[in-house]
Image (cartoon, rainbow, N blue to C red):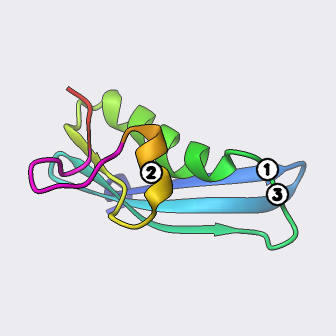
Amino acid sequence: MGDQVLLVVAEEGDELVAGALNLIGGDTVYGRLWGCHPRSYYPSLHFEACYYQAIEAAIEPNLKTVEAGAQGEHKIQRGQTRDEDDPGFWTL
């Protein structure tokens, strides 16, 4: 099952400051959970951990889609739109 989980972590020095949990099923990476230390602020860390790293991880094994979830208008700024014909980020 380890090859069906993608855990992205962010550290500052020896301290864990954030993480994103993704599940892999079929040819899709599904972003599920995100967390960040409440006293930490790193501009764009959320997008790096949740989107950019998931997309990069999907490219090497030729996974077709990164499904980042349907919540958040901020995703539109980074190219993800939600409609019935668009299940996520395509990595073809």
How far apart are labels 1 and 2 at the CA level? 18 Å
Q: Is 36 left, or right, of 54 in this rendering?
A: right
Instruction: Identify the residue under disc 1.
Output: 42
Callout 1 secondary element: loop
How far apart are labels 2 and 3 at the CA level? 19 Å
Q: Amino acid at mark 2?
A: Lys
Q: Is residue 83 magenta?
A: yes
Q: Is 18 left, or right, of 2 in this rendering?
A: right
| Range covered by the magenta-colored residues | 80-88
How far apart are labels 1 and 3 at the CA level? 4 Å
Q: Residue at x 63, y 69 (%)?
A: 35
Indicate which disc residue 17 carries.
Answer: none
Q: Is residue 70 magenta?
A: no
Q: Are marks 1 and 3 in contact (CB under 8 Å)?
A: yes
Q: Is 11 left, or right, of 47 in this rendering?
A: right
Q: Is the residue 50 above or below the residue 33 in the image?
A: above
Indicate which disc residue 41 carries.
Answer: 3
Q: How far across and how far down the image is residue 56, in percent?
A: 43, 32
